[in-house]
Amino acid sequence: MNILTKAYVAQHVLRWRLTWDCRDTRKRVTVAGNPKFVGPRDAVGLIRDGDVVAFSGLAGNQRPAIMYWAIREVFEETGHPRDLDLLAIGGIGGRGRVPGSLEELGQEGLVKRFISGHMETFKAFLRLADKGKVELQCLPQGVLALLLDAQMRGEDSISLRTGVGTFIDPRVGRGSPLTNGHAEQWVSIEGDRLRYRIPKINVAIFNAPAADREGNIYVRRCAMIGESREIARAARRNGGKVIVNVGLVVDKGYGEVFLPADEVDAIVVFKGTEQTVTVPHRRHWSLFSTESSLPIDKALALTKQVSNMMGITPRRTPADYVLARLAARLFAEHSHKGAYVNIGVGLPEEVCRLMYEGGLLDDITLLTESGVLGGVPTPGVFFGAEACPKQIISSPEVFKLCYEKLDVTVLGVVQADSQGNVNVSKRGDGAINYVGPGGFIDLTTAAKMVIFVSSWMDKAVYNVRDGKVRVAQPGTPKFIDHVDEITFSGAEAVRAGKKVFYATHVGAFQLTERGMELIRVMPGIDIRKDILGVSPMKVILPESGNVPLVTLPIVTGDGFRLVLE
């Protein structure tokens, strides 16, 4: 990246940081002859006490920030609207640090119940829940997306095998309620399936790029559309209201109409409305849209530079790159041309980078649970968007696609155990330490092959030298006898005949009917001392007793190639 581009990125991030909390919720942008164009506070007047309000978005994408601020300010001044149920299927909080996220509504009395698939970013709600001030309900992200799709069609519940054998299964764990007390259970057992339900939403609020003067909504040059159409039509079917926050007023014909004017109750124009975090619709980056002409390598370099400058991208070690190459090689050996591949957040992003650099993009389709397909998922702060996507569909549509066609998902791990179970949803006690499954349960249910990518131990230090990997400083085991919460059921995966691999710094495991079998070991790793001697997880060795070594190109990177075999 040249010095001019770096300077541009620095200026871009600085401008966003200096203005990220600037707003005037009393300002109205109106259109003559169309009363649907209102100010943010006017739109809040459509929300009644006790309403069930649904939002669309994932991570930093599609934030209707001006509406979050307006709802909070009106509540603080008047005490209304209050006792709301809020639903957001993806993690669109600010982790208690970034303003203008859904966390603005984490006020005692404003919210009665919060419903999501990913809880970790909503620190304000988690703190309230630990005080007994808010009820938390957590369901898999894909299940929530499909429930919104069902409500749009007038259906109240759905039945799936998704979640069987995990914590969401009342026979195994707590089901949907995350907080203690007398919270409703929204999951019931129905033979070998689970039936899911949620309350009927009656207010939909989402961010879209533009509206014309008649009130038609356009999503041209968006980074994602999430659940926008589904929550709008579900709210309307349930007799409710639709509020759309846009960044631009355009001429009719700006693009294909996403939502016609007669399906919209209020349009709030705010010049700071973002395409994705830091990038307003008024100065959109085409690289996030299907209209991008920027080469993928330059698009990825630009997004990575923003994340680096914001301190979002983790610092990777040489051992992490070895781990990513191991996972990428497992993918290439066991996948095929034409595969649909989902990439999770964290270390899987490094595997995704290798897939792209290895020239596999013409042979596979990468996708994210937000509904963006065909480009390369963007890391760090832009997670949920893609660089140079070929198609953008809704999140319910992409989960339907996954259930039909998903071949591989590459995901991270908090804990794994002797039965091949994986926990990614619970980091510790109390709501404040709860992560939630996101789309993890749906994706591992849908995929034919699952590749988990994980450090062998928390806070361990590894040296990579002379073609060998050595444990310089042990850490806390992540591979244990029993996980704290089952987000992925090893028994269900074996029953379904899935291929399941676990790539780590010390080698690779495969889940078999015998258990967690060590199928490759890193050169320099002593199986007895570095694996069997430190792991509470029961490790199965091959029946031959010989564990193949990871090849030298994976360890050094020299001559490393990916070919779908």
Image (cartoon, grey):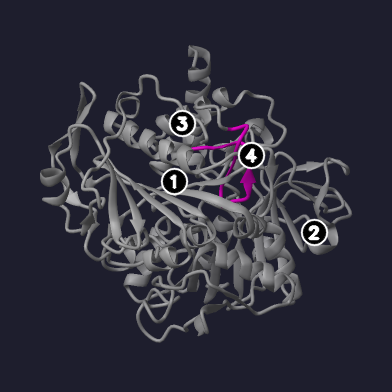
Which badge, 1 or 3, comes first in the chain's sequence? 1
Residue 366 falls in which quadrant of the image? top right
Q: Residue at x 27, y 66 (%)?
A: 484
Question: Tags 1 and 3 in contact by the CB under 8 Å rule?
Answer: no
The residue segment tinted magenta is: 361-379
Residue type at numbered disc 3:
Leu
From the viewer's perspective, is residue 191 above or below residue 138?
below
The amino acid on which the numbered mark 2 sits, given as a three-letter code, is Lys
Separation of marks 4 and 1 at Cα, in angstroms: 17 Å
Q: Residue furthest front?
A: 544
Residue underneath mark 1? 345
Q: Which residue is mark 3?
A: 354
Q: Given this view, does label 4 or label 2 mark the residue nearer the observer?
A: 4
Q: Residues within 10 Å of mark 4 (few under 14, many from 20)?
A: many
In the drawing, what numbered circle is on residue 374?
4
Residue 490 in view of the camera = yes
Residue 101 screen position, x and y as percent: 50, 53
Q: Position of residue 279 (x, y in %)?
A: 58, 36
Picture residue at 39% right of the left edge, 53% below the top = 96
Q: Which numbered disc flags the more N-terminal residue, 2 or 3?
A: 2
Is disc 4 in contact with disc 2, using a CB cutoff of under 8 Å? no
Q: Position of residue 433 (x, y in %)?
A: 31, 61
Q: Which mark is residue 36?
A: 2
Amino acid type of the residue tagged 4 in the rendering: Gly
Q: CA distance from mark 4 to mark 3?
A: 16 Å
Label 1 and label 3: CA atoms lie apart by 15 Å
State how far apart marks 4 and 2 are (Cα): 36 Å
